[in-house]
């Protein structure tokens, strides 16, 4: 798995040159109904200009990965004749990603059931990548290499891991896979609620509950027999 990622470094043509990517991001932000932050801009530019066959997008839940970065990346790729395939380990996640990108999403398992001769390359965007085992990740990257496809792995190593052995997404990042990062949570606009979310991400339950008590929401406890 690690060898497949490493062998793909520097082997792909970028979707856009640096100046083109900057213009694409500025255009996408103007058309958006909410302001972008610098992390979203930088991540989008990084994916559009990446020369690697496999790249990562590591981002907390609520950082608007899909609606800003991935939507812009997919749109710019398709505008230049690059086919985009939406994949995820689960059917629900695949449908959510597909809907966000305006296409039908497929499960990773369904993709792996195909052979490389039936695939036409392009870019495979894989959401919830932390759910993939090392075995499935290796199989997916191998199929992508045979199909001459690029892969963008999207997820958060602090969310649910795979049922099968191997924290593949985390291992790839640790081994040096080019990875854009998003850590600015924008889903929660209430300051106390956002603090509670960040505390939860860090595993600090006491601070999370304290933040909720200060105005981030309600904590309701009841007993049952």
Image: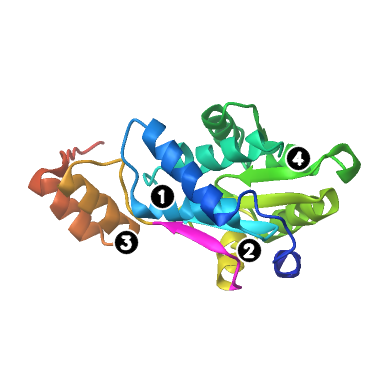
The mark nearer the N terminus, 1 or 3, is: 1
Residue 203, label in figure: 3
- Give the quadrant of residue 94: top right
Q: Is residue 3 left or right of residue 214?
A: right
Q: Quadrant of residue 92?
A: top right
Number of the front mark, 2 or 4 = 4
**Nearer-N-terminus badge (2/1):** 1
Left or right: residue 211 versus residue 166 is left
Give the numbered dot on residue 154: none
Q: Can residue 60 be seen here?
A: no
Marks 2 and 1, how far apart in space? 29 Å
Residue 32 as seen in the image, left or right of residue 2: left
Number of residues whose C-alpha sits closer than 10 Å to that of mark 3, classed few (under 14), some (14–19) or many (20 or more): few
User: How many badges with numbers are in the image?
Assistant: 4
Is residue 187 magenta-colored?
Answer: no
For the residues labelled 1 and 3, the Cα–Cα distance comes to 25 Å
Q: Which residues are magenta?
A: 175-182
Q: Nearer the viewer, residue 10 or 124?
A: 10
Residue 12: x %, y % from top left: 72, 57
Q: CA distance from mark 4 to mark 3?
A: 35 Å
Dot 1: element: helix
Please give the label number shown on residue 166.
Answer: 2
- x then y, percent, for residue 77: 63, 40
Mark number displayed over residue 111:
4
Crowding near the residue tagged with mark 2, few <14, some 14–19, many ≥20 C-alpha atoms within 10 Å: some
- Seen as rendered, the residue at the extreme bottom is 175
In the displayed structure, would residue 114 be above or below residue 204?
above
Q: Earlier in the sequence, mark 3 or mark 2?
A: 2
Instruction: Name the quarter where the C terminus is drawn.
Output: top left
* Pair 1/4: label in front: 1
Tell me the CA gap for discs 2 and 4: 20 Å
- Identify residue for label 1: 40
């Amino acid at each position: 798995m690690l060898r497949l990622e490493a062998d793909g470094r520097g082997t792909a043509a970028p979707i856009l040159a640096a100046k083109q990517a900057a213009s694409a991001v500025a255009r996408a932000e103007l058309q958006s109904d909410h302001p972008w932050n610098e992390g979203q801009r930088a991540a989008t530019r990084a994916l559009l200009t990446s020369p690697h066959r496999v790249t990562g997008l590591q981002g907390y839940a609520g950082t608007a990965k899909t609606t800003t970065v991935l939507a812009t990346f997919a749109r710019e790729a398709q505008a230049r004749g690059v086919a985009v395939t939406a994949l995820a380990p689960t059917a629900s996640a695949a449908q959510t990603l597909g809907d966000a990108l305006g296409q039908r999403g497929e499960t990773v398992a369904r993709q792996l059931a195909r052979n490389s001769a039936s695939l036409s390359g392009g870019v495979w965007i894989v959401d919830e990548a932390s759910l993939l085992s090392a075995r499935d990740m290796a199989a997916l990257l191998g199929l992508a290499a045979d199909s001459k496809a690029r892969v963008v792995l999207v997820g958060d190593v602090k969310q649910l891991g795979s049922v099968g052995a191997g924290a593949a997404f985390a291992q790839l990042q640790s081994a040096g896979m080019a990875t854009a990062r998003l850590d600015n949570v924008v889903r929660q606009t209430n300051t106390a609620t956002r603090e509670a979310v960040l505390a939860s991400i860090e595993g600090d339950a006491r601070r999370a509950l304290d933040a909720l008590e200060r105005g981030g929401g309600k904590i309701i406890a009841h007993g049952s027999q």
